[in-house]
């Protein structure tokens, strides 16, 4: 079964965005019932997009780091958008109502969006939870600047000596090229709906 999940993840990853690609805007329902798109905020410099979920132990281990990224970078123009793409039939703990409960209990200060059709995850090539994308605003478009893991220590944020997402955003804010544009995302495979 793990092999099947890995193969499905691999298939989807090859079809998704690569670093340097322009991202197609999307509209997804937030846990507050409102629709959110990239174009909503005119004053942003980009976004930190986190494909995550309620149920994966790895996603849970990184949850506080996603919250911290938003606290650190939203005021600088790079807010977090969290997206949950697991099929709720396969993973009931990731239903829309469960997402609402999680966002409320953890006091999320960023949108937690439901990708019910899984279209956005497929377009990005997201395979895991968490799977991070940093997109930089260029005019009215967004270009992928980083894809992959948050950092290099799944168990202990303090022990991570490579903080890939934070380093990428700091380099973009400084007008520099991202030194490490990708790092392998780790975590549970996204639970894909049967075709």
Image (cartoon, grey):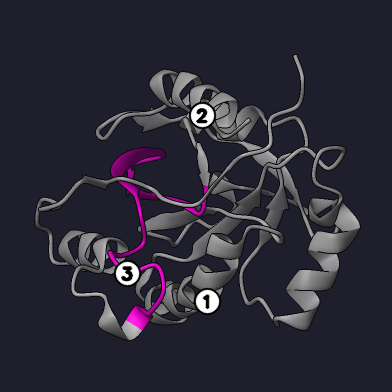
**Which quadrant of the figure contains the N terminus?**
top right
Instruction: Give the structural element (helix, strand or loop) at label 1.
Output: helix
Mark 3 highlights which residue?
153
Residue 32 seen anywhere in this rendered image of the structure: no
The disc label shown at residue 67, or none: 1
On the image, which quarter does residue 157 sit in?
bottom left
- Closer to us: mark 1 or mark 3? 3
Residue under pointer 2? 9
Write the start and end of the magenta stretch as one range.
129-157
Residue 180 visible to the viewer: yes
Query: Who is closer to the viewer here, 8 or 51?
Result: 8
Q: Nearer the viewer, residue 55 or 164?
A: 55
Q: CA distance from mark 1 to mark 3?
A: 17 Å
CA distance separating discs 2 and 3: 22 Å
Which comes before the other along the chain, label 2 or label 1?
2
- Which of the two discs, 2 and 1, sits closer to the camera? 2
Q: Nearer the viewer, residue 138 or 53?
A: 53
Q: In this rendering, would 109 be left or right of 38?
A: right
> Which numbered marker is on residue 183?
none
Could you tell me which residue is drawn at 57 percent across and 34 percent down? Answer: 2
The secondary structure type at the circle numbered 3 is: loop
Measuring 53% from the left and 71% from the top, which residue is drawn there? 61
Which residue shows up at 85% across the image and 51% down it? 95
Quadrant in which the C terminus appears: top right
- The reply, left or right, for residue 152 in relation to residue 150 is left
Mark 2 element type: helix
């Amino acid at each position: 079964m793990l092999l099947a999940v890995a193969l499905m993840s691999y298939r989807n990853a090859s079809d998704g965005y690569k670093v340097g690609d322009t991202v197609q805007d999307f509209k997804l329902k937030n846990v507050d019932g409102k629709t959110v798109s990239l174009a909503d905020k005119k004053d942003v410099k980009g976004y930190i997009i986190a494909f995550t979920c309620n149920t994966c132990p790895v996603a849970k281990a990184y949850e506080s780091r996603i919250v911290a990224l938003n606290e650190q970078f939203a005021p600088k123009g790079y807010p977090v958008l969290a997206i949950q793409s697991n099929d709720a039939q396969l993973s009931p703990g990731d239903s829309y109502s469960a997402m609402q409960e999680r966002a409320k209990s953890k006091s999320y200060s960023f949108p937690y969006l439901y990708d019910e059709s899984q279209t956005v995850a497929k377009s990005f090539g997201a395979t895991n939870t968490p799977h991070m994308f940093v997109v930089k605003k260029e005019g009215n478009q967004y270009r992928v600047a980083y894809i992959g893991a948050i950092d290099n220590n799944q168990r202990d944020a303090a022990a991570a000596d490579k903080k890939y997402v934070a380093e990428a955003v700091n380099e973009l804010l400084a007008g520099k090229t991202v030194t490490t544009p990708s790092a392998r995302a780790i975590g549970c495979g996204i639970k894909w709906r049967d075709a």
